[in-house]
Amino acid sequence: MVLAVKVAGHGNESSLHSQVKAWYVKPGDRLEAEVDGYVVDIVRGDLLIEVQTKNFSAVREKLRRLVQNHRLRLVFPIAVRKWIIHVAEGSGEVLGRRRSPKRGSLVDLFDELVRIPELMASKRFELEVLLVEVEEVRCADGQGSWRRRGVSILDRRLLRIVNCVRFCSAEDFLRFLPEQLVQPFTNKDLAACAGVSLRLAQRITYSLRKMGVLLVVGKEGRALLHVVSVRPEKIFSL
């Protein structure tokens, strides 16, 4: 018997997006409801819930406008484990399935959060990160990214929710600064202490500065020196 998989079409809502929404829905919720001219995934009383699986830049303006007058929760899944399914072009026949050696972690949220950190300065905004296991359906159709040698990602599907972590204020993100990190510190110091890349450390400190929980107090050579702000100031007025 030939096994085949059904995948979401290009440009449509991914299975992962719709499955996360389905997991969140409670009795009485309104789905795909229009609020202030925008379609919102879930409306629960006075709370708006928006699911975004990638590319925070695409919803930045939408979030900024909605949070002016509404409580808003952004839900973001991060794949801590991923299985890759390769399918044949056209038929969808499964050619193979393997587990990816790459594993995500909570700190990966800064790869997207760096695009909207100022929103955390609003008391009406919160971010919930879901740590999930997923399947990723791929096809060697020559239409995908050059980084994947033309292999397209057709769909991502939720297998299991491992954990969820909610960030309700800018101060909640200070958990990403290790206790042993000596202040003031540079991005290089943070990278070494937290065991992350320099690029990710730069995204962390940029985001925390925009949130108002880190201050720049000087330089060490060309590197900025950071300290935790005792009284975080809201630098983004809504």
Image (tube, rainbow, N blue to C red):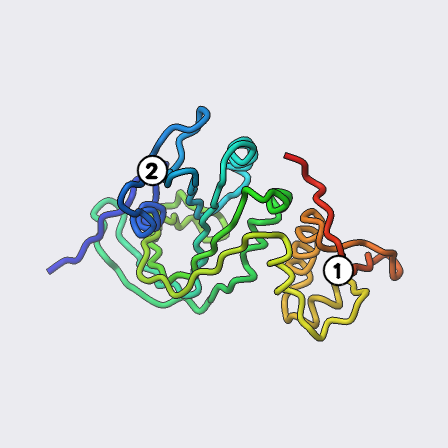
The image shows residue 196 at horizontal and vertical percentages of 63, 67
Sequence-earlier tag: 2 or 1: 2
Give me the C-alpha separation between circle 2 and circle 1. Answer: 42 Å
Quadrant of residue 193 within the rendered picture: bottom right
Q: Amino acid at mark 1?
A: Val
Instruction: Give the residue pinned by disc 2.
Output: 12
Q: In which quadrant of the rendered image does the N terminus lie?
A: bottom left
Instruction: Give the residue pinned by disc 1.
Output: 228
Above or below, 92 relative to 79:
above
Residue 121 placement, left or right of 46: right
Kind of element beneath mark 1: strand
The image shows residue 105 at horizontal and vertical percentages of 51, 64
Residue 116 placement, left or right of 155: right
Q: In which quadrant of the rendered image does the C terminus lie?
A: top right
Q: Please give the name of the residue rendered at 51% of the width and 50% of the height, measured from the top-left corner.
A: 127
Front: mark 2 or 1:
1
Number of residues whose C-alpha sits closer than 10 Å to that of mark 1, classed few (under 14), some (14–19) or many (20 or more): some
The image shows residue 185 at horizontal and vertical percentages of 79, 65
The image shows residue 159 at horizontal and vertical percentages of 31, 60
Along the line of sight, which residue is nearer the eye, 220 or 210?
210
**The label number, if any, that marks residue 123 in the structure image:** none
Residue 53 placement, left or right of 171: left
